[in-house]
Image (cartoon, coloured by chain):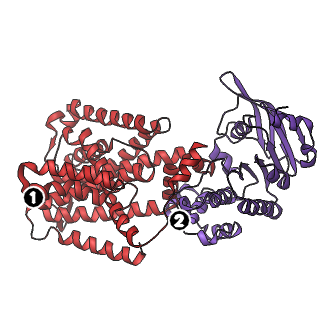
Chain colours: A purple, B red
């Protein structure tokens, strides 16, 4: 099998006396959409933040395309082709939709000096328009991001994660708080992006229907450890998973 | 605001600035020159605080560094045009260093760190008499001699300062309109998200301090030549707070805010002098009332008037709050 895009090895993280993540290991390959599910407090977000450099793991390594990125700052990780979205709304509210999108790509263009003396849009206007169009935000192009509805901000957040053309995107609860129509739209756009660009996704989500319809493989976490792994159908019928969710 | 309307307004403001000192006495010209100089200092703080969201109570200390460097060099025979860039460069380097605490501490704690720096600079200027003249300061600082255009008289010096202000404002306009400006605003609005999008928030934080400090240094180089005498008391904490007030009153994070803010803080007390002993009380009350009713500063007044007549979307605070409560 080819080299994994993301390889997580024996990640551990504790907060005080509480072990939030206990030796988690998994690989994700090119074009795969991996779902990471688990009850509240199972360690999903902690694991995400360890992978993404927001938290320093106590032990373990993270490799992206074979390169050890453990402990790298999020900005460096992003420049290596790793995008992410956040569980909470994470747009820049006082900037327009267009500026949010351009910001998401500008640090990947040119040098510090060219970004000071070059064009205001960093030469990204056409790419930004394409991304706005792909996520069907055209009518909101000049609108302040903070004035968008919750669902629209979630879409914008996703569009920003893809702007720099990442090889790997980690989506933290993209469906959280989004209405059914917007949810279907978001799911369809993510699937379309994955099909068009072969980008690898890791998705944390509580919405089972969203995960099962989008992901090709699912990992289940409980109390900081992996308790099950398989296709959506296998996970759906796994008794350990049902027990972990229902507390049985 | 439409681009054409903005251009007309800018040209009208420049025309007003050119015409304002004509027929005025030396004192009024001195006050107008001070307004321009403090606008430059406030422009720098506006970048650090208004655009990048990093609080600083040390802008007067950078004015001091720029002023003393320029004064010492011009007194040693250097031309102002050669001395000023060194003062500005010194501020860039020291400002870059002052930015390091901002990587670790935020908000009130950062304010205290910068406040301590301001006090430190004041003490160095007061105690190192061999270099700075101590409390007696430095006297007889020459003004720039530009050959045919002498700035020894107050009116030519005003126009010289106006030209420097316009150049500084154009440079600032270029910065805030560039991708750097977008990164500064991203740092203010959501540093964690900015970092996740590849923005090197450490470097941008340091640059916000360094560039803001450069503007303080430039203002210092000009004030040394305007007054032709400097002493540590002119650059104490009260002056940093005054520059902070200019940014807040004008409108933090708005390009023209510093000009309006410096106008209110420098010119309003002069306009109110006809009230004699009451002018400072009236001035203080006016500033308090304005900050209560228009916390976004004077630029916000225009926004409020516009919003009454033209419906436009604004950033929703409820979603941000909701997200934070999750």
**Residue B153 appears in the figure:** no
Residue under numbered circle 1: B27
Crowd around label 2: few <14 · some 14–19 · many ≥20 (10 Å)? some
Q: Is residue A31 left or right of residue A168?
A: right
Q: Position of residue B221 (x, y in %)?
A: 26, 51
Question: What residue do we see at 58% from left, 66% from top?
Answer: A98
Residue under numbered circle 2: A118
Q: Position of residue B116 (x, y in %)?
A: 34, 32
Q: Position of residue A101 (x, y in %)?
A: 61, 62
Which residue, as the protein is rendered here, is positioned at the far top?
Answer: A17
User: Marks 1/2: CA distance?
Assistant: 43 Å
Q: Is residue A219 left or right of residue A71?
A: right
Is B83 or B59 nearer to us in this picture?
B59
Which structural element holds mark 2? loop
Is A20 or A247 nearer to us in this picture?
A247
Is A192 placed above or below A201 here? below
Q: Chain of mark 1?
A: B
Q: Position of residue B178 (x, y in %)?
A: 49, 62
Q: Is residue A176 left or right of residue B283?
A: right
Is A38 or A143 nearer to us in this picture?
A38
Image-quadrant location for residue B249: bottom left
Which tag is nearer the camera, tag 1 or tag 2? 1
Question: What residue do we see at 73% from left, 37% from top?
Answer: A40
The total of numbered circles placed on residues is 2
């Amino acid at each position: 099998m080819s080299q994994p895009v993301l390889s997580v090895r024996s990640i551990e993280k504790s907060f005080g006396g509480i072990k939030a993540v206990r030796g988690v290991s998994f690989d994700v390959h090119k074009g795969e959409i991996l779902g990471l599910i688990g009850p509240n407090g199972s360690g999903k977000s902690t694991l995400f933040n360890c992978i993404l450099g927001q938290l320093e793991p106590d032990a373990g390594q993270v490799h992206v395309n074979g390169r050890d990125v453990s402990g790298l700052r999020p900005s460096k990780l992003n420049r290596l082709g790793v995008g992410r979205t956040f569980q909470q709304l994470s747009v820049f509210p006082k900037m327009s939709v267009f500026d949010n999108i351009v910001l998401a790509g500008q640090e990947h263009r040119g040098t510090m000096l060219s970004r000071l003396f070059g064009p205001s849009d960093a030469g990204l206007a056409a790419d930004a328009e394409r991304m706005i169009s792909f996520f069907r935000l055209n009518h909101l192009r000049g609108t302040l991001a903070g004035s968008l509805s919750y669902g629209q901000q979630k879409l914008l957040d996703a569009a920003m994660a893809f702007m720099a053309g990442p090889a790997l995107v980690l989506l933290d609860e993209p469906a959280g708080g989004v209405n059914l129509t917007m949810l279907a739209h978001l799911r369809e756009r993510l699937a379309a992006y994955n099909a068009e660009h072969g980008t690898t996704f890791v998705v944390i989500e509580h919405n089972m229907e969203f995960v099962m319809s989008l992901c090709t493989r699912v990992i289940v976490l409980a109390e900081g450890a992996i308790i099950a792994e398989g296709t959506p159908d296998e996970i759906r019928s796994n008794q350990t998973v049902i027990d972990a969710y229902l507390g049985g | 605001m439409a681009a054409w309307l903005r251009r007309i307004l800018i040209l009208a403001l420049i025309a007003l600035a050119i015409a304002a000192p004509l027929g005025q006495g030396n004192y009024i010209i001195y006050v107008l020159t001070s307004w321009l100089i403090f606008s430059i200092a406030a422009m720098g703080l506006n970048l650090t605080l208004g655009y990048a969201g990093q609080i600083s109570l040390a802008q007067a200390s950078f004015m001091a560094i720029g002023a003393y460097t320029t004064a010492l060099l011009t007194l040693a025979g250097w031309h102002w045009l050669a001395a000023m860039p060194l003062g500005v460069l010194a501020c860039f380097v020291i400002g870059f260093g002052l930015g390091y605490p901002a990587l670790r501490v935020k908000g009130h704690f950062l304010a205290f760190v910068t406040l301590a720096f301001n006090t430190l600079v004041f003490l160095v200027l007061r105690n190192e008499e061999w270099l700075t003249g101590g409390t007696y300061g430095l006297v007889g600082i020459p003004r720039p001699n530009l050959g045919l255009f002498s700035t020894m008289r107050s009116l030519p010096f005003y126009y010289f300062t106006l030209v420097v202000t316009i150049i500084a404002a154009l440079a600032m306009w270029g910065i805030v309109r560039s991708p750097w400006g977008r990164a500064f605003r991203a740092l203010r609005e959501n540093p964690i998200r900015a970092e996740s999008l590849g923005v090197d928030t450490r470097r941008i934080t340091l640059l916000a301090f360094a560039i803001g400090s450069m503007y303080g240094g430039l203002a210092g180089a000009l004030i040394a030549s305007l007054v032709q005498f400097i002493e540590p008391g002119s650059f104490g904490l009260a002056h940093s707070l005054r520059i902070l007030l200019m940014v807040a009153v004008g409108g933090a994070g708005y390009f023209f805010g510093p000009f309006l803010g410096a106008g209110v803080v420098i010119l309003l007390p002069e306009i109110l002098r006809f009230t004699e002993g009451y002018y400072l009380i009236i001035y203080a009350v006016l500033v308090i009332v304005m900050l209560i009713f228009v916390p976004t500063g004077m630029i916000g007044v225009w926004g409020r008037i516009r919003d009454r007549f033209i419906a436009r979307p604004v950033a929703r605070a409820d979603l941000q709050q909701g997200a934070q409560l999750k």
